[in-house]
Structure formats: C-alpha cells, structure tokens
Image (cartoon, helix red, strand yellow):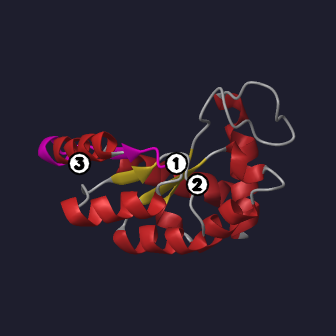
Amino acid sequence: MAAQERSFRAHIEIAKRHGKTLVIHDREAHADVLRVLDEEGAPDRTVFHCYSGDAAMAEICAAKGYYMSFAGNMTFKNAQPLRDALAVATLDRVLVETDAPFLTPAPFRGRPNAPYLIPVTVRAMAAVRGIDENAMAEALAVNTARAFDY
C-alpha cells in the first residue's frame, strides 16, 4: 500500500508538471485517494475513471471539480449506488466510457464491451439525470473535450 501511495503521489506531480489530465482508477480506496489528492493538490483536470464511489463521494468530487466517468456497470441491477452518484454529480463533471472489454451495459452484459455500446450507457445516464439523450450526449462531448484539453 505504501508503494502504491508513493507512486500515486508521483503521478500527481507528473500530471501537474506537464499540465496533463490525471486519470485515476480508484478501486476500494476512496478515502485514501481523496486524502492524497488533498495533500498533494490535484491537477487542474482530474478524472475518476470507471467511477465506483457513492453519492457522498460524488458530491465531494463535484465540489473539488473532479470529473467522474461512468461505464456500463451503472446499468446493472445492483448498481443503485452508482446511479445515485450520477444523480448528484454536477452535469459539467460527468463523462462516459466503455472500460472495454469489461463492464458491458445491460442488457448486453456477458458479452465483450466495445464503443458501439456507448449509446446504451448514455441512454441510461440520461434517464438517471431526467434529461434528453441528446442533451446528455452534448454535455458528455463538451466535458470530454474540456477534461482532456482538446
């Protein structure tokens, strides 16, 4: 764990030094990741890849300006905590991803995930947010461009 934390701190420093987006795969280490980001000072653009936190963490991430990227697992029946997180995340900090070949959205779960299934996840995200699919897609496009500076 100590080696992981040292490496994480080094990655934060590298991202800040080079003006790059920091992409974090936080798995079962939410409190530690947030603590280290606070201690080191997060880069201007920080993305939680394959967001796995709850609504309380989403509120913290939104307040700090972190992006939260949701994958197909947010469509799973047992993923209500992810849908709750998406519901409270600010729309300007939400992203979408495949995590291909993993986390294929329902009803295609069990098959390899791929980019052609992104619309399934976007539709589910729009439903959670209570907005039109096109509005969701437009927000995601703008957010992606901003998050990755292109």
Query: Can you say which quadrant of the picture contains the N terminus?
Result: top left
* Residue 62, quarter of the rendered image: bottom left
For residue 137, which numbered disc appears in the image? Answer: none
Closer to us: 132 or 7: 7
Q: How many marks?
A: 3
For residue 52, which numbered disc appears in the image? Answer: 2
Label 3 crowd bin: few (<14), some (14–19), many (20+), radius 10 Å: some
- According to the picture, the residue beneath numbered tag 3 turns out to be 9
Give the CA separation, mark 2 to mark 3. 21 Å
- According to the picture, the residue beneath numbered tag 1 turns out to be 27
Q: Given contact means CB atoms under 8 Å apart, are the residues at marks 2 and 3 in contact? A: no
136 on left or right of 79: left
101 on left or right of 140: right
Q: Can residue 131 be seen in this view?
A: no
Residue sitting at x 43%, y 67% = 61
Q: What stretch is highlighted in magenta?
A: 16-27
Magenta includes 82?
no
Q: Is residue 102 above or below residue 22?
A: above
Label 2 crowd bin: few (<14), some (14–19), many (20+), radius 10 Å: many
User: Element at badge 1?
Assistant: loop
Mark found first going from the N terminus, 3 or 1: 3
Q: Position of residue 150 (x, y in %)?
A: 33, 41
